[in-house]
Amino acid sequence: GAVVSQHPSRVICKSGTSVKIECRSLDFQATTMFWYRQFPKQSLMLMATSNEGSKATYEQGVEKDKFLINHASLTLSTLTVTSAHPEDSSFYICSAVGQVGSGYTFGSGTRLTVV
Amino acid sequence: AQSVSQHNHHVILSEAASLELGCNYSYGGTVNLFWYVQYPGQHLQLLLKYFSGDPLVKGIKGFEAEFIKSKFSFNLRKPSVQWSDTAEYFCAVNPTGTASKLTFGTGTRLQVTL
């Protein structure tokens, strides 16, 4: 079945630094990728939708300059948390969709801790 | 915009008990419906989905869900739970015909005791 690889699985960074999270579709071309944030014991909140070759669409309240999303190819999307602060500590999950009707495949998530 | 409600936040059951988790959605058009499971420390996995056709959908691991259009509901059921079913369960919807964003419910934590 479809597999999405997300790296790193865990990252600890200092406040003020930037962190890049990668999301790769391994055996299919992902026309659309979604980035979610999950707080402890809460649901997934969509941050942005990215389509290959175009700018990401951010949900209301998500700072596009802070959470930079790049979807440069049909198999790779990256989320860069810039100038990270402790309040950015969270679990970030990507999801990829191939052709319409093919369903959503989720990455294993990245636990970001900003100290 | 669509929204999803899961009223059971934390459910504790003994092994072999029957399970029903509620999911209600709000949206003005037709939707696709999903149930995902997240085992401790693991990523989201699809349990089952409904796009069209038979409103009773069977998924993996003995789970099923019934779409009741009149009630805007898509409740998840399992006749006899196992300890290994302990996990977080999420209901999600998106408008039909598009690879659009999924809207998730707040999740239900299921704890199955031996």
Image (cartoon, grey):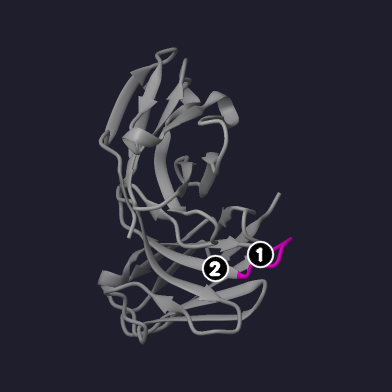
Q: Residue at x 29, y 73 (%)?
A: A60
Q: Are marks 2 and 1 on the same chain?
A: yes
Residue A115 visible: no
SS class, disc 1: strand
Residue type beneath disc 1 = Ser
Residue position marked by numbered label 2 in the rendering: A33
Answer left or right for A38 relative to B43.
Answer: left
Q: In the image, is residue A71 above or below residue A96?
A: below
Q: Residue at x 70, y 63 (%)?
A: A26
Q: Which residues are magenta?
A: A26-31
Which chain does the residue under circle 2 lie in?
Answer: A
Q: Nearer the viewer, mark 2 or mark 1?
A: 2
Residue position marked by numbered label 1 in the rendering: A25
Q: How many badges with numbers are in the image?
A: 2
Which chain does the residue under circle 1 lie in?
Answer: A
Relative image position of residue A52 (x, y in whole percent): 60, 78
Disc 2 to disc 1: CB gap under 8 Å: yes
Relative image position of residue B84 (x, y in whole percent): 49, 27
Relative image position of residue A88 (x, y in whole percent): 31, 71
Closer-to-camera residue (B71/A44) = B71
Q: In the image, is residue B53 above or below residue B113?
A: below
Q: Residue at x 39, y 36 (%)?
A: B69
Q: Is residue B6 magenta?
A: no
Q: CA distance from mark 2 to mark 1?
A: 9 Å
